Amino acid sequence: MAAIPDEAKHLFEGKDFAHVATINPDGTPQVSAVWIAMDGDLITFNTAEGRVKPKNLRANPAVALSIHAQDNPYENLIVQGKVVDITPDGADDDIDALAKRYLDADSYPFRQPGEERVIVKIEPEKVNHANP
């Protein structure tokens, strides 16, 4: 496992978005912007069952993501890794915490009826941080 450098961890604490790339069943890439966080040494994001990301990641756990700092777009973090868990445990509280951080909202305002949230946990394998 590769470590996220300490000087890049602030990218997981503010309102910077990540773009997460997964592999579709036909081998083509799929990219989505997500709210991002860390859980220990793992990178996490929250999504909903039925969406493309969890389907793709269950079939192929390879993932890549990039984050650039909104206040310094030349600072970026690029990570390649693998998904080690997709879990509903704590996912509702997690999306509310992310909504607080990203939107200053007490709860996630875009929840759909019957939606089942999941947390995707990524183990970094290759990390590149640039801050020129």
Image (tube, helix red, strand yellow):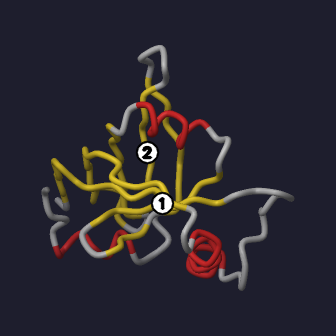
Amino acid found under the numbered disc labelled 1: Phe
Q: Quadrant of residue 37?
A: bottom left
Tell which residue pokes out farthest to the top in this image: 26
On the image, the x and y values in percent for residue 105 come to: 71, 81
Question: As rendered, which of 21 and 62 lies closer to the eye?
Answer: 62
Q: Residues within 10 Å of mark 2 (few under 14, many from 20)?
A: many
Q: Quadrant of residue 114?
A: bottom right
User: At 45% from the left edge and 47% from the top edge, which residue is drawn?
Assistant: 19
Which quadrant of the rendered structure holds the C terminus? bottom left
In the rendered image, which residue does mark 2 sit on? Answer: 20
User: At 13% from the left edge and 57% from the top edge, which residue is drawn?
Assistant: 2
Helix or strand or loop: what does disc 1 sit on? Answer: strand
User: At 51% from the left edge and 61% from the top edge, which residue is drawn?
Assistant: 119
1 or 2: mark nearer the eye: 1
Amino acid found under the numbered disc labelled 2: Val
Question: As rendered, which of 124 and 68 lies closer to the eye?
Answer: 124
On the image, the x and y values in percent for residue 130 come to: 18, 56
Q: Earlier in the sequence, mark 1 or mark 2?
A: 2
In the rendered image, which residue does mark 1 sit on? Answer: 45
> Label 1, label 2: how many angstroms apart (C-alpha)?
9 Å
Mark 1 and mark 2 residues within 8 Å of each other at the beta carbon: yes
Q: Which mark is residue 7?
A: none
Q: Residues within 10 Å of mark 1 (few under 14, many from 20)?
A: many
User: At 17% from the left edge and 75% from the top edge, which residue is drawn?
Assistant: 6
Helix or strand or loop: what does disc 2 sit on? Answer: strand
Q: Is residue 60 above or below residue 70?
A: above
On the image, the x and y values in percent for residue 89 come to: 54, 69
Q: Quadrant of residue 62?
A: top left
